[in-house]
Image: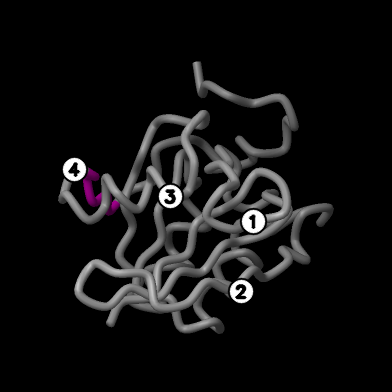
Amino acid sequence: MVIIAIPSMNDGGLNDFLNPRFGRCPCFTFIELENKEVTAVKIINNVATNSMGGAGIQAAQIVGENKADTVIINFLGPNAIQALKSFNIKIFELRNDKISIKDVLDLYNKGELAEINASNVNSHFGTNKNITNPN
């Protein structure tokens, strides 16, 4: 079994969309997979959404405390990646913020997502609520 955490755009769930902002997403959709089949879905609100600072670290703590083995992200800063690594969480990148969580899982199950070990944006990237591209 694997537990995957995905930052979600709105209310979470399989029909919601991947949020490009990890630390400031409104919630995380946690999916339990066994033999590539969804066995459970849980939505956890992200209390770090409106934090003055440290949102990525706080969000990583939420992911770790909910026993995720894997996180699938769009963009992730250096502090958040260090925090996720402290929980031994695998990090997969998907640069598409117009994709449903259900479609994200399909790509994961097909092995089409790249695992990353370093941040892909600078610190404080997600503080701009209209971010869709780091450039």
Q: Earlier in the sequence, mark 3 or mark 1?
A: 1
Residue 49 location, x and y as percent?
A: 77, 54
Q: CA distance from mark 3 to mark 1?
A: 11 Å
Q: Are marks 4 and 3 in contact (CB under 8 Å)?
A: no
- The reply to whether the magenta stretch includes residue 108 is no
Crowding at dot 3, Cα within 10 Å, few <14 / some 14-19 / many 20+, comes out as some
Marking on residue 12: 1
Please, is residue 127 above or below residue 44 in the view? Answer: above
Q: Kindly identify which residue carries mark 4.
A: 112
Crowding at dot 4, Cα within 10 Å, few <14 / some 14-19 / many 20+, comes out as few
Q: CA distance from mark 1 to mark 4?
A: 22 Å
Q: Kindly identify which residue carries mark 3.
A: 102
Marking on residue 35: none
Mark count: 4
Looking at the rendered structure, the kind of residue marked 1 is Gly
Q: CA distance from mark 2 to mark 1?
A: 15 Å
Please, is residue 57 above or below residue 131 in the view? Answer: below
Looking at the rendered structure, the kind of residue marked 2 is Ile
Quarter of the view holding residue 3: bottom left
Give left or right: position of 55 versus 105: right
Please, is residue 102 above or below residue 36 in the view? Answer: above
First to last magenta residue range? 113-117
Of badges 2 and 1, nearer the viewer stands: 1
Looking at the rendered structure, the kind of residue marked 4 is Glu
Residue 110 location, x and y as percent?
A: 17, 49
Q: CA distance from mark 2 to mark 3?
A: 21 Å
Q: CA distance from mark 4 to mark 3?
A: 14 Å
